[in-house]
Amino acid sequence: NVSVVLFTADLRVHDHPPLRAALDGSRRVVPLFVRDRAVDAAGFAAPNRLAFLADCLHDLDAELRRRGGRLVLRSGDLVTEVCRVAAEADADEVHLAADVSRHAQRREERLRRALEADGRRLHVHETVTTAVAPGAVTPSASDHFAVFTPYFRQWAQQQLRDPLGAPRTVRVPDGVGSEELPSRAGLTGVAEGLARGGEAEGRKRLGAWLRSGIAAYEDRHDDLAGDATSRLSPHLHFGTLSPVELVHRAREAGGPGAEAFVRQLAWRDFHRQVLSARPAAAADDYRTQHDRWRSERSAHEDVEAWKEGRTGYPVVDAAMRQLLHEGWMHNRGRLLTAGFLTKTLYVDWRVGARYFLAHLVDGDVANNQLNWQWMAGTGTDTRPNRVLNPVAQAKRHDPDGAYVRRWVPELAAVEGPAVHEPWKLRGPDLEALGYPEPVVDLSEGLTRFKRARGRD
Ligand code: FAD
């Protein structure tokens, strides 16, 4: 009468179908998190996400203890550890949320086989890490949608299950040992302005967002300086908030802001259903192949300038510095900086995607790789050759220049939108600022782009 609940990207007690199913019939459960060695070995364990994860694990443990339980932490090979814990607890079943990356899919298969060999069952639950499960809606002629708009039409018509409350009590069997939970304090290389993790923090943020942010989302989501998006992405990534619950609560709030927000949540599911059907899209071009990219080595200086936020294009630099300071970047900044790297500098999208994954607290294979591919024109964008002009974009989405002044102190004294084109300032003024000259001329970049795409 014991179940193991394996927590992965669903670090919460509210709206947690695997936990609820495991507790059914007053069974005892072992809430387990395994620090998967393979994820670390793949270089995916970035300090910002490890720090956020440490907060999440502490918080999950606290939530479970409040209900009479506790979290068991193990590290090593995930399959071996789950089987070991199941044996120690004499559990007959293991519950797990479905996930989409190739690594997760293979891991799930291995786990199923290993458990079955020991006479135990694996239950895989859908709609824990997405609102609509990958594969739940498909076009007639394919196993997934390659274009967002028709996907969204069907997605929006799906009847979502009701969100579950948190369980009142969690009874854990004796005799299953746990490693000590990790703490933020022991980590180096964590961004100074990194947000706090954990379900309690996520629910607080969600409450504030529903009360005072969501209503203006449609009008303000692109306003770089206004910072008027939810910042719920790391909570969705680690599953401290449930996407099903989020859609329900946003719909209850109602209005154009909520509708626009729900549409963004559908983007998240969209990318997951692409990756689930085409796991190779994490590394390979999804739809259109381009092979004339500059590599990290051949464009070394440009790439370094981009990474460090000294390209000479203030809005690009501001966004890259926000990433370094917070481990998070505004969506408009992500679009601009990714467009700049791939279409102006013509550097392989994988170089940028890797760098983002090394820093983003919400760094997520599906969202990151497929958004990068969108910007590079290799992915699901139906207008793959569109180019964002960083100066025009800056004037539009940071009209007064406040975002640039916040993140690029060298330009803090330049007033108004002039901050977006420092090269127009006169000689001595410009030199005194100590801000770099542009690494590339925009029209040169465009020529290179057109030539590489065979469009001239
Ligand atoms: P909000 O605007 O409040 O949106 C609410 C939620 O909707 C987000 O938390 C997110 O889960 C989802 N969402 C919003 N926009 C997108 C989108 N374009 N694609 C998929 N889901 C979306 N998002 C990640 O979560 N992880 C990543 O690694 C990631 N990498 C990106 C890389 C690039 C090059 C680009 C252009 C976008 C990337 N995004 C990524 C998508 C998006 O930028 C972030 O989800 C968003 O900025 C997070 O801030 P927020 O929570 O305030 O978003």
Image: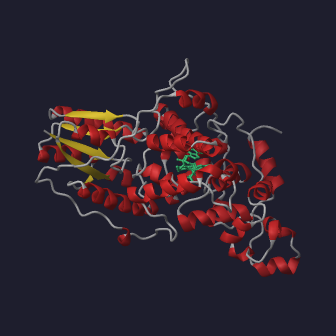
Residue drawn at x 43%, y 40% as measured from the top left: 101
Taking the image as drawn, is residue 265 in sight?
yes
Position of 154 relative to 226 (above/below): above
For the residue pair 241 and 181, the one nearer the viewer reads as 241
Position of 261 relative to 322 (above/below): above
Taking the image as drawn, is residue 146 in sight?
no
Q: Quadrant of residue 284?
A: top right
71 horizontally vs 259: left or right:
left
For the residue pair 451 and 267, the one nearer the viewer reads as 267
Position of 263 relative to 388 (above/below): above
Provide residue 434's location: percent of width, then percent of height: 74, 78
Q: Quadrant of residue 151?
A: top right
Residue drawn at x 89%, y 75% as measured from the top left: 426
The quadrant of the picture occupied by the N terminus is: top left
Residue drawn at x 10%, y 54% as measured from the top left: 175
For the residue pair 220 and 452, the one nearer the viewer reads as 220
Provide residue 438's location: percent of width, then percent of height: 77, 65
Residue drawn at x 45%, y 58% as measured from the top left: 204
